[in-house]
Image: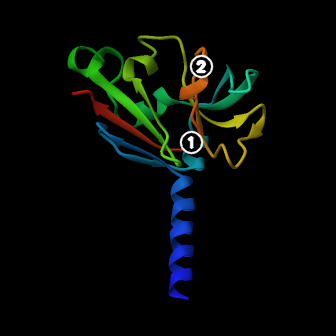
Amino acid sequence: MRTICFLFAFFFLQQLKAQTIQVTGEVTKKLNLTKDDLAKMNRTTVTAKDKDGKDHTYKGVAVAEILTQAGVTTGAQLRGANLSKYLLVTCADGYAVVFSLAELDAAFTDKVVILADESDGQPLPVDKGPWRIVVPGEKKPARCCYRVTTLNVGFAK
């Protein structure tokens, strides 16, 4: 009976963790964002090809906006040593992808990478959500990862 209770508690905590996005690392304010927190932020829509080769419309929050709320170096301060900063995105299954901060900053690029919660007007399916990173304009959607749990900012050494 104890084993069953332990397993249930473990599963419950994993599901609860999957319902938040942690923003950690080289930030001035660590964040634990919920769906409600993200719903209060500016919404952005992008179109990108998925692994099926078809265009899909995704809706969510620009990753740059999330990083700004966490106090990450952006804009005019993103120069010199700060250009060696990166964002490591980690997913529930352990998959991870990296972006330089310059790839996400409007001072450097017009491309908007989003943390999406909708695809083609519908919530993301359970096996792809509740959030996924969408990178429009990339030829290979390998960094369009799903079931995102953590955004960690670091310095390349």
Residue shown at 73%/21% (left/top)?
53
Q: Does label 1 or label 2 sit earlier along the sequence?
A: 1
Q: Residue 149 in the image: x percent, y percent?
A: 50, 46
| Position of 3 relative to 62 (above/below) | below
Query: Which image quadrant is residue 100 in?
Result: top left
Quick one: quadrant of the N terminus? bottom right
Q: Residue 48 in the image: x percent, y percent?
A: 67, 20
Q: Residue 21 in the image: x percent, y percent?
A: 49, 46
Q: How is the image coloured?
A: rainbow
Residue type at mark 2: give it. Answer: Lys
Give the Cα distance between marks 1 and 2: 27 Å
Depth order, front residue of 151/97: 97
Which mark is drawn over residue 38? 1
Quick one: quadrant of the C terminus? top left
Residue shown at 51%/86% (left/top)?
2
Q: Residue 120 in the image: x percent, y percent?
A: 77, 31
The answer to whether 106 appears left or right of 122 in the picture is left
Query: Which image quadrant is residue 72 in?
Result: top left
Count of residue discs: 2
Task: Say few, some or many: other residues with alpha carbon within 10 Å of mark 1 (under 14 / 14 to 19 / 20 or more).
Answer: some
| Position of 91 relative to 119 (above/below) | below
Query: Which image quadrant is residue 40 in?
Result: top right
Residue type at mark 1: give it. Answer: Leu
The answer to whether 70 appears left or right of 138 in the picture is left
Read off the residue under disc 2. Answer: 140
Tag 2 secondary structure: loop
| Position of 61 relative to 84 (above/below) | below
